[in-house]
Amino acid sequence: MRFLTSRCRPVTLILALIAVWMLLSVYYLEIGIKDPVKYSPSSKETPEYIQMFQKQQEQVFAERRALYEKQCQKGFKGGAGEVYYYQPAKLAVCHVQKVGCTFWKRIFHFLYGDTNGKNISSPFEIERYYVHFVGGKKTNTSSYAAKKALFDSFNKVLFVRDPWARIWSVYIDKFVLPDSWLDYGRAIANRRVDRSRRKSCPDDIGFVEYLDFALNVKQDAHWKPVHQVCSPCVFRPQYLGKMETFSKDSAHVLREVGLESLVQGHDHAHYAQDEVRMLTEYIFRVFEARPPLRKCLTHAGVAERLWMAFVLNGYIGDAQTFPKEEFTKAIDGMVNTRAASQKVVELMLKYHANSTARTSQQMKDYRRSVMVQHYRQAPRPLLEKIVKMYNGDFVLFDYEARPADIFQPDP
């Protein structure tokens, strides 16, 4: 009997643990607790979940503040440039390009009613082209220095990004897509030793060419180190958000200032669809507004460049080749660029929907692998220059200066 009892004890313990696990699972389901990494704002969140999420986020922001405060004591300097602010909510966001700036511009445009005369119910209905090139007359902005006393009484917000990912993102948005072909693209092409490759339609700018230009020739706000655009040692943000956790970080900030309703229901699926729609509409507006691009691309050509960008970003599966015949038949006869844009949005969303079998982690892993492949084509001196130039960002914001997958020696 004693033998049987001793043999049963482990089984009894295992059964007890399973029972506890099942009870906890039911409890978590009942109060709505989810994986905070996959958090997206929802109108159905329970008070218990919101309280847990807020407490968790407060700890994250406290740790980030402690890190940058410690590093600032070592003498890091920099400036703090343009700040978007909304006095009723005491919200001030330091503007940094390629770190969710379109999101924040849409938020502020919506708060100030700067919506291109449209009656809309969400900031995500405001066009990207409008917030970057047309609007802003009603939206309050200022340099940090000009209103330092005011901003220091506000909830100050700064979002940052892994320098390796930010530099790569600029390449996709500006050179895979034709947004910077007519200025920086031509400047890069004109540096080529082979004069036959210097062209007015630089549709073949390579990643290494772009890196060499960005690091050795021209500093632009899109790829300038974040701490030089908006230093936390100067701006002193209470909330230092990260692009890698943008959804939950921005949701926490907006909830803290009483504006959480602006992003309710805007989850990961909505974000991806919005990005496909917004970027397609934006690039077609750029194509329409810059006549020289019409000598470089047709409507179908613009669609093909967008397809390339969406594949690199994981919104469309890399196994799918661009259906050129379908797009050409649908839009190349159109005179109206806006109509062509809407047709391309429709087609892109169809192919995006067919690619959603990937989990968010699989998409993230895919994007990372593509980025790493491109960096590993770069000469080591260029990579070392990134480490040196962006040292402040790596140290202040806790990013890895020498990622093993990028610096892994060739076999």
Image (spheres, rainbow, N blue to C red):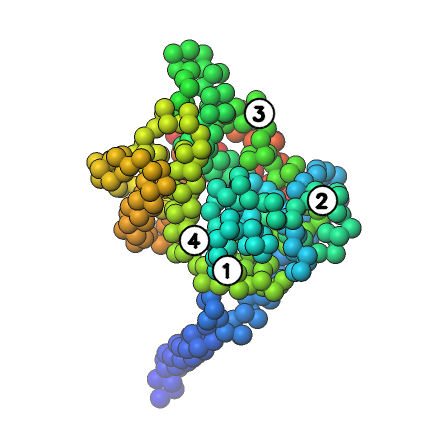
Which label was assigned to residue 271?
4
Q: Circles 4 and 2: CB distance less than 8 Å?
A: no
Which label was assigned to residue 263?
1
What SS does tag 1 mark? helix
* Residue nearest the viewer, comparing 272 with 400: 272
Marks 4 and 2, Cα distance to the nearest angstrom? 30 Å
Q: How would you rate the neighbour count of disc 2 (Cα within 10 Å): few for under 14, some for 14-19, many for 20 or more? A: many
What SS does tag 4 mark? helix
- In the picture of the structure, the residue carrying the numbered disc 2 is 144
279 displayed left or right of 58? left
Q: Earlier in the sequence, mark 1 or mark 4?
A: 1
Q: What residue type is labelled 2?
A: Tyr
Q: How would you rate the neighbour count of disc 4 (Cα within 10 Å): few for under 14, some for 14-19, many for 20 or more? A: some
Can you see residue 400?
Answer: no
* Residue nearest the viewer, comparing 107 with 48: 107
Quadrant where the C terminus lies? top left
Quadrant where the N terminus lies? bottom left
Q: Which of marks 1 and 3 is nearer the N terminus?
A: 3
Can you see residue 354?
Answer: yes
257 displayed left or right of 119? right
Question: Can you say whether 5 is above or below 69 in the image?
Answer: below
Marks 2 and 3, Cα distance to the nearest angstrom? 25 Å
- The residue located at (28%, 37%) in the rendering is 334
Q: Which of marks 3 and 4 is nearer the N terminus?
A: 3
Q: What residue type is labelled 4?
A: Tyr
- In the picture of the structure, the residue carrying the numbered disc 3 is 218
Question: Can you say whether 70 is above or below 408 in the image?
Answer: below
> What x and y, as percent, mark residue 193?
45, 12
Q: Earlier in the sequence, mark 2 or mark 3?
A: 2
